[in-house]
Amino acid sequence: MKINDLIFRYSFPNNWPKDGLCRVRTFINSRFQVYVLITDLGVKNTSASVTNSIEIICESLKTRLIVPETSIFIEHYEPSSVNDHTFDIITIEKGNEPKWENINLSAAKCLLDCDDEELDNLSLENKFLLDEIDKTITQINPHLDLPRQLESDYILRGLEIQKNMVPKLSLIELVEKNSKEIDFLNLLKKDLSLFAEVYASPSDNYICFAEFPLNGGFVDFVLLTGTSRMDVFLIEIKGAEFNILNKGSYEKFNAKIDRAVVQITDRLGYIHRNNLEFRKNIHMIRERVVGGESLFNSFIGPDKTTRVDKNKDINIHNIIIGGRTIDDIKESYKRQNFEYNFNLPIKLESWETFIRKLRRN
């Protein structure tokens, strides 16, 4: 027989970590034994799991006279996508050390003298319990569900970027018209956040450049992002007036893709022959842009804080975007084989595959 079913708030010595939540059900079986089922609340628990808090929970339930001193405790996790119910009988040994003894579902029902319906009443699907959980979470931390506070500069920059976004449809129209490289360059220069949306991590911390000077020439677009070690993306653009793979054959990429590979190979050779100089220069440019200068059509994200260490090595990523996709599955295998087998880190994107990765409308 079940005699109570409640959401229990438990605290830790010295108030650290913060208070946690669990579900507690007390049963008296036909043998007049008192069993206490302690159920973890998963994502709704505001602190350490039931497993990592079990001795605190058991002691608190007894000292607050919610359950008898002679109670037998069972730790319980409800079904997830990978596990069924799990049950462990808890014994608190000398030194306040818990010991777990796993039991199966049938054994748990026998000890509790309960039916399937009782255990099928999942905590996060019970409206009454959910109301109690949310009420108690608010008491523990009234600000838990509030969005993080942002600086005015961050918000204003985010609004500016959003206001001037190039719609995805504009890019799709260029592709459908089989437009040339110059048409893509002109459109992309209007909104460099297109590249950040696909490649930046953190998503709000980046600087993009157009026509970035390198070794006497220019890289179409460059993206700086990353945490600790800076990620540098060198992006080469081609038009959509050709198929990425030669028509009628899935053996060779179009010659324009081959030319882009040669361009990137030359740039990589220069960068790695002058590694320290390039790293110093790219960080100097980053710092100047963060400081307010406009260099090489620079476009900075909402978060202007420095997340990278200029004394650490940098990661160089090379992207080629160009051409049309005809057979997506076959071409994806071909691109993957190229990226895997080519001895330089180059990623190939057709315009279709790039556009699919955009989150904007």
Image (spheres, rainbow, N blue to C red):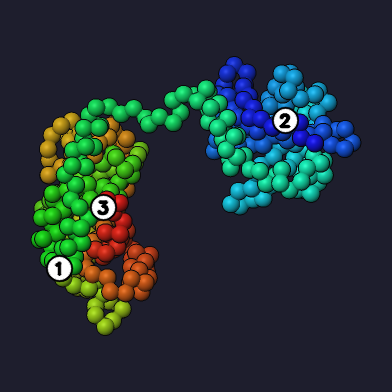
Answer with left or right where residue 246 lies relative to residue 135: left
Precedes in sequence: disc 1 or disc 2 = 2
Mark 3 vs mark 1: in front: 3
Q: Quadrant of residue 153?
A: top left
Q: Amino acid at mark 1?
A: Lys
Crowd class of label 2 (few under 14; some 14 to 19; many from 20; radius 10 Å): few
Residue for point 21% across, 68% down: 323
User: Residue extending furthest top?
Assistant: 14
Residue linked to disc 2: 4
Q: Are marks 1 and 2 in contact (CB under 8 Å)?
A: no
Mark 3 vs mark 2: in front: 2
Q: Which mark is on residue 177?
A: 1
SS at mark 3 in the image? loop
Residue for point 33% across, 41% down: 202
Residue linked to disc 3: 361
User: Residue extending furthest front?
Assistant: 128
Q: Amino acid at mark 2?
A: Asn
Residue for point 81% across, 23% down: 69
Answer with left or right where residue 356 lies relative to residue 74: left
Q: Quadrant of residue 171?
A: bottom left
On the image, the x and y values in percent for residue 102 come to 76, 43
Residue for point 13% across, 63% down: 181
